[in-house]
Amino acid sequence: METPNGPRVPCSQAAVARALLFGLVLIQVAGVAGTTDVVKAYNITWKSTNFKTILEWEPKPINSVYTVQISHRLGNWKNKCFYTTNTECDVTDEIVKNVKETYLARVLSYPADTSIYAVEPPFTNSPEFTPYLETNLGQPIIWSFEQVGTKLNVTVHDARTLVRANSTFLSLRDVFGKDLNYTLYYWKASSTGKKKATTNTNGFLIDVDKGENYCFHVQAVILSRRANQKSPESPIECTSHEKVLSTELFFIIGAVMLVIIIFIVVLSVSLHKCRKARAGQSGKENAPLNAA
Ligand SMILES: *[C@@H]1O[C@H](CO)[C@@H](O)[C@H](O)[C@H]1NC(C)=O
Ligand SMILES: *[C@@H]1O[C@H](CO)[C@@H](O)[C@H](O)[C@H]1NC(C)=O
Ligand SMILES: *[C@@H]1O[C@H](CO)[C@@H](O)[C@H](O)[C@H]1NC(C)=O
Ligand SMILES: *[C@@H]1O[C@H](CO)[C@@H](O)[C@H](O)[C@H]1NC(C)=O
């Protein structure tokens, strides 16, 4: 009499437990079923130039949408680009808050049908990213240049970034300070031997040979970096001292020649008229002679 009751209680407990477990499994299976067609992001990369920063990943979503989360070390996740079907997300706003921080992002995948709510969406972590060390330097632009006598003055444009301080946008020089050098590569237009000059401002003032034309380009260098130290090279510019003079000379010579031509035409026309008039006069003078 005791024995049926004895095992019955634990037995029914086991049954309940089994039923519960089965239920849980069912719920889990349903959950998994709801997210089976959700693809996880891969190949997450940071595309960043002068702090403008876009997170990119693959693949193009089918039946799913992505949300990006970004955080600096020990920070809270901040959601960006909610339920997007894109495979990129502009996170510039977040990383410019402190460009020396190290950031981590993750891309969460949700089913496109948002009624199937995924509590724990699958996600992929990005590599870490420290803007100050890793943002690419944009191609510099030579703002102005001037060759006066034996001095060549070259000024590099100080590019604006999206980093803000006191509600104004900072330039590349503001952000990097003395950590940013520019290198000038210059050579005589008539030769190929390159020379180098460096500056920790945005201006160069170098000694050159008078009357020679020079060509040059510049490159930005971040001194504190071990990798990704240099920008692409700027487009090449050349001084055209001689050429400017020769075009000026060309116009002067042209103008002088035009004046001479007009003068000759006017002179020959008036001479012709004079000769005709004289011929007419001599004709009149001759007539009486002939008649006589
Ligand atoms: C990531 O991209 C590279 C080329 O950009 C490709 O070779 C590689 O197979 C990709 N990784 C995956 C997991 O598809
Ligand atoms: C060089 O050129 C810049 C821009 O035109 C000018 O501001 C600067 O004063 C010049 N420097 C010298 C030494 O002439
Ligand atoms: C911003 O303003 C504060 C005080 O108003 C000043 O100390 C700081 O140097 C300013 N920063 C910049 C980058 O101008
Ligand atoms: C940076 O520029 C300064 C000033 O011209 C120069 O003294 C220094 O050597 C440069 N540093 C490098 C690594 O080129």
Image: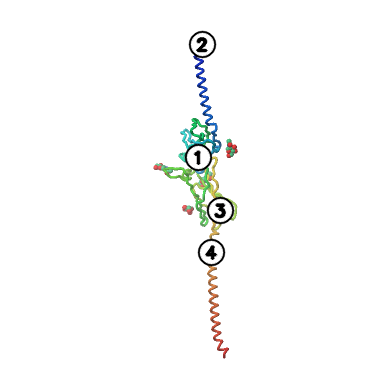
Mark 2 and mark 4: span between their CA atoms? Answer: 122 Å
Q: Amino acid at mark 3?
A: Cys
- Image x and y of residue 253, in percent: 54, 66
Q: Amino acid at mark 2?
A: Pro
Quadrant of the image for the C terminus?
bottom right
Q: Nearer the viewer, residue 15 or 95?
A: 15
- Image x and y of residue 277, in percent: 53, 81
* Residue 106 seen in render: no
The residue indicated by pointer 3 is 215
Mark 3 and mark 4: span between their CA atoms? Answer: 25 Å
Mark 1 and mark 3: span between their CA atoms? Answer: 40 Å
Are dots 1 and 2 in contact, CB under 8 Å?
no
The residue indicated by pointer 1 is 89
Q: How is the image coloured?
A: rainbow
> From the viewer's perspective, is residue 20 above or below residue 112?
above
Q: Within 8 Å of ligand 2, the CB of disc 4?
A: no
- Image x and y of residue 201, in percent: 49, 47
User: Which of the two marks, 1 or 2, is nearer to us in this view?
Assistant: 2
User: Which of the two marks, 1 or 4, is nearer to us in this view?
Assistant: 1
User: Which of the two marks, 3 or 2, is nearer to us in this view?
Assistant: 2
The residue indicated by pointer 4 is 251
